[in-house]
Amino acid sequence: MGWVAQRGREEGALVNNDVGWQELTLGLFRRIRSDLVKTVDGAAIASLDWKASPASNSAGWLAWHIARGQDRNLSEMIGPPQVWVSDGWAARFGRPADPTDTGFGHSEEQAAAFRSPGDHVLLAYHGAVHELAERYLSAAPDSDLGRVVVSPTLGNVHTVEERLRGLITDSFAHLGQIALLRGLMHDGVR
């Protein structure tokens, strides 16, 4: 029950109409994780720190910003401290253990000063953050989308739905920017 034939890319494919918001959202977070690994894994530090123009962000900064945004929002939604602080990730990035340092509101100078610790550290940090999404979305109650969450780091109030929507759209937008940067780089930087 709940499975119906779906027309589209795969003729006759079955689609489960009983999927809840949690499973759908978790699938999107898994796609973000997969796409981030595909675009960052194996990249040299010079490639991660390369910028298309002085005012643009580097791929490394964008990958870090994706992870930091998810870490901040998920921790504020579900309660544990940010893994950036609690698990010592800030030190691995050579940055202060400041829960507000997510890249949101960074000036051009702050973003330009960011130096990537390497693809493995970027992806390991995002992997630790992704575990928060897995744990939360695997157990989130059906009614949680309307729950109001106060952000002590930003001083604003949003529902869980608004936070998740923002995280997902922001993450996919930045993944597109990373892919574009990787495509623009000349062969000597890769």
Image: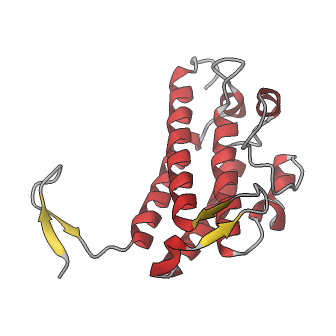
Residue in the image at 50% along x and 56% along y: 165
Up the image or down, 118 lies above or below 16; here it is above
The percent coordinates of residue 50 (x first, y second) are 68, 25
Q: Residue at x 74, y 43 (%)?
A: 103
Q: Nearer the viewer, residue 105 or 53?
A: 105
Quarter of the view holding residue 47: top right
Q: Residue furthest right?
A: 96
The C terminus - image quarter: top right
Q: Is residue 161 above or below residue 40?
A: below
Which residue sits at x=52%, y=72%?
146
Q: Which residue appears at 56% of the width and 67% of the height?
A: 160
Q: Is residue 85 left or right of residue 31?
A: right
Residue 87 lies, in percent from the top left, at: 80, 66
Give x and y (percent) for residue 41: 58, 44
Q: Quadrant of residue 187?
A: top right
Q: Is residue 124 visible?
A: no
Q: Identify the image quadrant of the N terminus.
A: bottom left
- Residue 83 in picture, x, y percent from top left: 75, 65
Counting the numbered discs, the total is 0
Q: Nearer the viewer, residue 111 or 45?
A: 111
User: Considering only vertical position in the picture, is 10 above or below 81?
Assistant: above
Q: Nearer the viewer, residue 27 or 49?
A: 27
Q: Is residue 62 visible?
A: yes
The chosen color scheme is: secondary structure
User: Against 129, is 187 above or below?
Assistant: above
